[in-house]
Image (tube, rainbow, N blue to C red):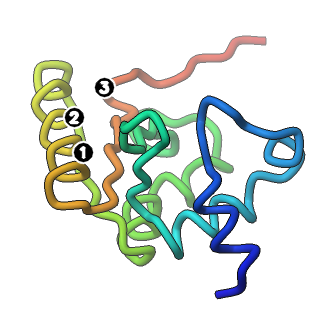
Amino acid sequence: MNADTRELAADFDLERLTPEFYADPYPTYRALREKEPVKRLPNGSYFLTLVTMRGEWGEFNPWQVPMGSSTAAVFELSGIKVLRATHAEEVREVVEAAAGQAYNACTPTAVLLSQRLIGAKVFTK
């Protein structure tokens, strides 16, 4: 890992995103994944990923299906623990568990919010 990668991860602050980040966030994402997958931000908080899913329950768009069916595996192959909420009554418990895991165990964690939970998109012509 080079000095630029370490610097990108060390300097990352959600409250002070640079124009360079907005133009191309992927080098920063890679630096965070490699150097600090659970990033303690300057204000003392931790970064936890919540993902609203597509390509699952009632999906109408065939372009969404491949990523929707592989999202959890991609996270897991990247070393990120995945938790999933499928019903509204479990969201709080799942997010609290993920936050505790990210903070207490310093485990990078993503919560997948199922398309069944958020509802299938409907587009009309």
Residue 72 in which image quadrant: bottom left
Residue occupying image coordinates x 46% and y 59%:
71
For numbered disc 3, what is the local secondary structure? helix
- Residue 55 against residue 72 in the figure, above or below: above
For disc 2, the marked residue is 95
N-terminal of the two: label 3 or label 1? 1
The amino acid sitting under disc 3 is: Leu
The amino acid sitting under disc 1 is: Arg
Q: Nearer the viewer, residue 13 or 28?
A: 13
Are the residues tagged 2 and 1 within 8 Å (C-beta)?
Answer: no
For disc 1, the marked residue is 84
For numbered disc 2, what is the local secondary structure? helix
Residue occupying image coordinates x 47% and y 25%:
120
For numbered disc 1, what is the local secondary structure? strand
Are the residues tagged 3 and 2 within 8 Å (C-beta)?
Answer: no
Indicate which label's residue lies in the foreground, 2 or 1. Answer: 2
The amino acid sitting under disc 2 is: Val
Residue occupying image coordinates x 47% and y 44%:
41
* Extreme-top residue of the structure: 125
Total numbered labels placed on residues in the image:
3
For disc 3, the marked residue is 117
Q: Nearer the viewer, residue 54 or 109?
A: 109
Q: Which numbered disc covers residue 50? A: none
Indicate which label's residue lies in the foreground, 3 or 2. Answer: 2
N-terminal of the two: label 3 or label 2? 2
Residue 70 screen position, x and y as percent? 46, 64
Are the residues tagged 3 and 1 within 8 Å (C-beta)?
Answer: no
N-terminal of the two: label 2 or label 1? 1
Mark 3 vs mark 2, CA separation in Å: 14 Å
